[in-house]
Image: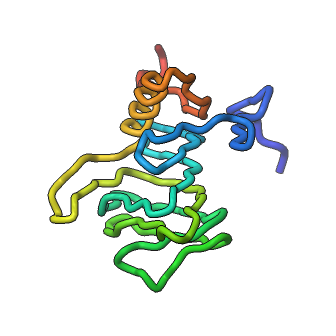
């Protein structure tokens, strides 16, 4: 078999260095976010997030899968308090799962890398709908937060957008 023809030639690699690019702080209270890849059309979002000690996110329903790798610190789901996720832990979450993210107050927070397909449908403690968090919501929130803070929105990878016809 001969080498196939490249259909997506790259002159340079698409890469984001979270060690040199400033993150966005408090777009969601208690979170520091490095957006890496936001595909609003296909509903895929990839983030590096640092969670402050004591942070509890809303209970949420996943419409798609999640891959979460813990880089540092400790966190767990309120529903699974004995299954702490620590540095080096990889967690797979199937679509249709429901849980509540929590970082213990005394744990120093957590740092994680996540690949999420679909949306988080967020609910309050009584099970009332709060909002839908997906790639589009994250992108909009990051831009609004950066504008309000007077800082530049960090660079992230965004696939070409706007569906159309192949002959246009």
At which x and y percent is residue 154? 59, 30
Q: Is residue 46 above or below residue 88?
A: above
Residue ID at (34%, 46%): 133
**Direction from residue 158 to residue 21 in the image, left or right:** right
Q: Residue at x 42, y 24 (%)?
A: 148
- The image shows residue 158, relative to residue 120, as above or below, that is above
Relative height, residue 12 to residue 107 (above, below): above
Residue 139 is situated, as x and y percent measured from the top left of the image, at 44, 34
Residue depicted at 48% across the width and 27% down the height: 146
- Furthest residue in direction front, as rendered: 106
User: Within the image, what quadrant is residue 13 found in?
Assistant: top right
| Count of all numbered marks drawn on residues in the image | 0
Most extreme residue toward the top, as rendered? 168
Closer to the camera in the image, 35 or 6: 35
- Where residue 110 sits in the image (x, y, percent)? 57, 62
Task: Give the colour scheme shown.
Answer: rainbow
| In front of the other: 134 or 7 | 134
- Indicate the quadrant where residue 107 lies: bottom right
Residue at the spot 28% in from the left edge and 54% down from the top edge: 121
Give x and y (percent) for residue 7: 69, 33
Q: Residue furthest bottom?
A: 82
């Amino acid at each position: 078999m001969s080498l196939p023809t490249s259909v997506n030639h790259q002159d340079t690699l698409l890469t984001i260095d979270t060690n040199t690019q400033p993150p966005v702080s408090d777009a969601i209270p208690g979170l520091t976010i490095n957006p890496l890849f936001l595909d609003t059309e296909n509903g895929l979002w990839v983030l590096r997030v640092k969670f402050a000690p004591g942070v509890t996110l809303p209970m949420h329903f996943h419409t798609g899968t999640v891959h979460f790798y813990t880089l540092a610190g400790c966190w767990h789901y309120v529903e699974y308090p004995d299954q702490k996720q620590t540095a080096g832990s990889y967690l797979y979450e199937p679509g249709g799962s429901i849980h509540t993210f929590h970082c213990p107050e005394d744990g120093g927070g957590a740092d994680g890398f996540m690949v999420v397909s679909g949306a988080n449908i967020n609910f309050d403690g009584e099970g009332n709908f709060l909002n839908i968090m997906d790639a589009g919501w994250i992108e909009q929130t990051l831009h609004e937060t950066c504008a309000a803070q007077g800082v530049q929105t960090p660079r992230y990878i965004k696939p070409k957008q706007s569906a159309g016809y192949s002959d246009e």
